[in-house]
Image: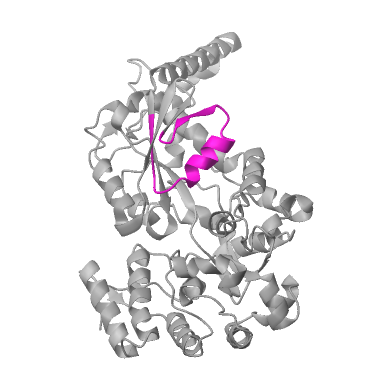
């Protein structure tokens, strides 16, 4: 497969030197050089007709190699994911995809098999890891062809040989030039190779209950609401005012990523665990608001947390990116705030991003051409990206498309009462700073929030909670020290 794939990627069949294979220690043999090479002078003296014929022959050889690969490509495309999001995107927006049943589809004569394992208790990553370890020895139709990753653990896979560089698929910098740079930084390995692509740009903000804003602030205008939550001091004031009107601002867990995305350094520095000042600000602000009954400690996605989707939940706001609109607010259910167009959007106290989904090509895929086409179509085709934005209320990874959506009514969202959020979302995507991203983020963030909850709920002192956190991190990452 690797030698055939090589034929697709090369612009000519006359190549000297060794080209590294896509799988770790495996390497594709160098293309054999002719026994007698023509000198530079001979080439310069060659008749124009002969040169043209050689060029045509080389082009024909490349076309034949490409055709051979297409003919020999695998008949099963295995996709690994943790939920139905990408499946729905492919089903709705990739021309030629036909759904067979909940776990199978067809693209031409290729069977598409969806292996979807929920993320709870790390089940998705555990399943993906176990399968990738068998990738080299697996039968062709059982190999993973593409899989999805999130920002919190992308580097875990990007910095291995299990992911193919986009360049090895024939995807160029020019193909991806309209994307936001941070979405590429997340999936760039330590050698500078880009190993994934996303259709999303997940800048995020504050999603507020318009009726609550009218009661608390006297207005639901996005600019006025933004002024009331423009920094954390103003946010705390507004949260206490909301409590006086019978509203809870939100859960402490809703605000966490806004703080954690604006830290000054990485979790682990020179092998030592470092708790950033901005994370201590989150603890102090949250404790003040929990004690004032202006925020709660509900876990994200839980039943109590979800009550805020309806008017009776008496929640002032949620924090989230555009995927939150579509997947978390239940706009298609009668009686929800979203179904009545009752949410508004503003940037909030600090710009931040949350999540996103990246498509990675698995090393060893026998469907390289199809994987390439899926990635290009779903993450770079402007018509498809605009369809996704308008049909799924998503913030897509295209500066051009977001500018178009922000410029007219095509970006208005019914669940936001007709508000167009794309100007703010696009501006937020430009501000995302990933300089402090690290492979420790998922474990440290989860452990920090779990420990802090004990403090917020009065089950531990602050020092005890911080000690719990440090112990959890050292157990998870033995190479890390915590003073």
**Residue 481 seen in the figure:** no
Residue 392, how many percent across, how many down?
61, 48
What residue is at 61 percent from the left and 61 percent from the top?
336
Give yes or no for residue 254 being in the magenta stretch: no
| Viewer-nearest residue: 405 or 419 | 419
- Quarter of the image where the N terminus is located: top left
Residue 384, quarter of picture: top right
- Quarter of the image where the C terminus is located: bottom left
Residue 140, quarter of picture: top left
Magenta span: 77-103
Question: Horizontally, is 153 left or right of 425 in the view?
Answer: left
**Residue 102 seen in the figure:** yes
| Viewer-nearest residue: 170 or 255 | 255
Residue 426, how many percent across, how many down?
65, 59
Give yes or no for residue 98 being in the magenta stretch: yes
Question: Horizontally, is 343 left or right of 256 in the view?
Answer: right
| Image label count | 0
Colour scheme shown = one colour
Question: Horizontally, is 42 left or right of 234 in the view?
Answer: left
| Viewer-nearest residue: 43 or 128 | 128
Residue 197, how many percent across, how many down?
49, 46
Residue 291, how many percent across, how many down?
47, 90
What residue is at 67 percent from the left and 47 percent from the top?
390
Q: Work out whether 464 lies above or below 305.
A: below
Residue 441, quarter of picture: bottom left
């Amino acid at each position: 497969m690797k030698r055939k794939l090589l034929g697709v990627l090369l612009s000519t069949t006359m190549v000297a030197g060794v080209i590294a294979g896509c799988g770790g220690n495996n390497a594709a043999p160098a293309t054999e050089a002719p026994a007698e090479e023509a000198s530079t002078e001979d080439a310069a003296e060659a008749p124009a007709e002969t040169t043209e014929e050689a060029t045509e022959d080389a082009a024909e050889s490349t076309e034949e190699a490409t055709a051979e690969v297409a003919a020999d490509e695998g008949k099963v495309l295995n996709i690994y994911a943790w939920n139905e999001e990408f499946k729905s995107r492919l089903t709705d927006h990739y021309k030629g995809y036909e759904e067979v049943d909940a776990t199978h589809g067809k693209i031409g004569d290729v069977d598409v098999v969806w292996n979807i394992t929920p993320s709870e208790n790390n089940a998705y990553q555990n399943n993906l890891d176990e399968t990738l370890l068998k990738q080299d020895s697996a039968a062709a139709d059982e190999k993973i062809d593409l899989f999805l990753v999130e920002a919190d653990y992308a580097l875990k896979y990007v910095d291995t040989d299990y992911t193919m560089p986009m360049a090895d698929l024939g995807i160029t910098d020019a193909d991806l030039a309209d994307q936001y740079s941070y979405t590429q930084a997340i999936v760039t390995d330590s050698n500078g190779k880009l190993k994934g692509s996303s259709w999303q740009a997940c800048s995020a903000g504050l999603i507020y209950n318009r009726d609550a804003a009218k009661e608390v602030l006297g207005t639901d205008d996005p600019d006025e609401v933004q002024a009331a939550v423009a920094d954390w001091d103003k946010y705390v004031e507004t949260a206490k005012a909301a409590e006086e009107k019978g509203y809870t601002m939100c859960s402490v867990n809703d605000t966490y990523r806004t703080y954690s995305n604006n830290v000054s350094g990485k979790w682990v520095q020179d092998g030592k665990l470092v708790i950033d000042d901005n994370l201590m600000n989150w603890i102090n602000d949250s404790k003040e608001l929990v004690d004032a009954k202006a925020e709660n400690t509900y876990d994200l996605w839980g039943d109590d947390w979800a009550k805020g989707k309806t008017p009776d939940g008496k929640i002032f706001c949620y924090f989230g990116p555009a995927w939150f609109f579509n997947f978390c607010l239940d706009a298609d259910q009668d009686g929800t705030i979203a179904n009545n167009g009752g949410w508004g959007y503003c940037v909030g106290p600090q710009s931040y991003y949350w999540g996103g989904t990246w498509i990675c090509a698995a090393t060893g895929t026998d469907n390289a051409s199809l994987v390439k086409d899926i990635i290009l179509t779903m993450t770079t085709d402007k018509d498809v990206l605009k369809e996704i934005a308008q049909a799924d209320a998503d913030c897509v990874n295209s500066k051009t498309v977001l500018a178009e959506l922000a410029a007219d009514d095509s970006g208005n969202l019914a669940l936001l009462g007709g508000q167009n959020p794309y100007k703010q979302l696009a501006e937020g995507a430009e501000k995302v700073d990933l300089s402090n991203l690290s492979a420790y983020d998922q474990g440290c963030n989860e452990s920090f929030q779990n420990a802090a909850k004990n403090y917020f709920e009065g089950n531990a002192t602050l020092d005890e909670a911080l000690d719990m956190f440090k112990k959890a991190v050292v157990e998870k990452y033995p190479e890390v020290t915590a003073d």
